[in-house]
């Protein structure tokens, strides 16, 4: 039994959307990796510096997410392949929504956590951001757990996202992955 590929959808995301996608993928990978390893560092100036970098990088990611959502509002993503089932379309939309919610929720919980613990977030080490809540140690500890849980949820969602992209590339052969990469065809800016 052979699999008949769905007709290839060559319509692509804009260059800006693709740059934002891959920049955010790299930033998320770095932030999760640093977030996981910084907890193991002994208390030192280096550990405090790494925490500071992690916080301003998280705020930078939040800014990128907002920019990406604004871009998406005015530059609609390409249509999904016509052969996709209604269930697959729903799963794709829900998956993307979950990724966006997590990419907003994680930096916000980190900022809230820092505020509740009494550690101001200073963007790029230069711009002090306002505390979102008053100092409250129990709230800070709760937000640590929420932040960690959301990161595990993000790892799960990104894993599903990658698996779905690979399924489309190698099983469905519908050209979906080529819409977000830089190798095939040309895209409008």
Image: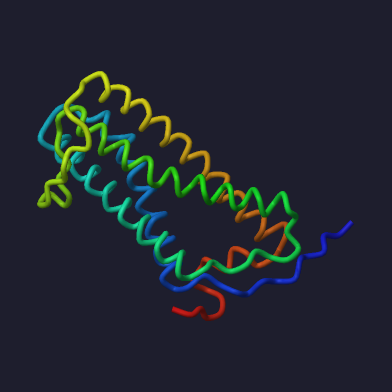
In which quadrant is the N terminus drawn? Answer: bottom right
In which quadrant is the C terminus drawn? Answer: bottom left
Q: Residue at x 17, y 26 (%)?
A: 135
Residue 49, image x and y in percent?
15, 40
Examine the image and state in which quarter residue 115 appears: top left
- Left or right, residue 18 beside residue 135: right
Frontmost residue, 132 versus 117: 132
Q: Residue at x 66, y 58 (%)?
A: 168
Report the residue that reaches farthest toward the top: 138
Residue 124, image x and y in percent?
16, 52
Examine the image and state in which quarter residue 136 appears: top left
- Left or right, residue 156 beside residue 11: left
Frontmost residue, 102 versus 22: 102
Colour scheme: rainbow
Q: Residue at x 26, y 35 (%)?
A: 112
- Left or right, residue 113 beside residue 91: left
Frontmost residue, 91 versus 70: 70
Residue 76, image x and y in percent?
52, 68
Report the residue that reaches farthest toward the right: 1
- Left or right, residue 150 beside residue 62: right
């Amino acid at each position: 039994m052979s699999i008949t590929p769905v007709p290839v959808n060559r319509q692509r995301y804009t260059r800006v959307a693709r740059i934002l996608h891959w920049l955010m993928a790299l930033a998320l990978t770095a932030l999760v990796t640093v977030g996981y390893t910084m907890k193991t560092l002994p208390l030192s100036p280096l550990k405090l510096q790494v925490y500071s970098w992690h916080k301003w990088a998280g705020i930078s990611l939040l800014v990128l997410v907002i920019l990406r959502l604004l871009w998406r509002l005015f530059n609609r993503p390409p249509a999904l392949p016509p052969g996709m089932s209604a269930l697959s379309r729903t799963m794709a939309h829900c998956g993307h929504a979950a990724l966006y919610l997590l990419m907003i929720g994680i930096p916000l919980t980190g900022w809230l956590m820092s505020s509740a613990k009494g550690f101001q977030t200073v963007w790029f080490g230069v711009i002090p951001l306002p505390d979102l809540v008053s100092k409250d140690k129990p709230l800070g500890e709760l937000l640590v757990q929420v932040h960690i849980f959301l990161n595990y949820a993000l790892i799960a969602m990104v894993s599903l996202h990658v698996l779905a992209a690979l399924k489309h590339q190698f099983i469905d052969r519908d050209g979906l992955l080529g819409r977000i990469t830089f190798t095939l065809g040309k895209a409008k800016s």
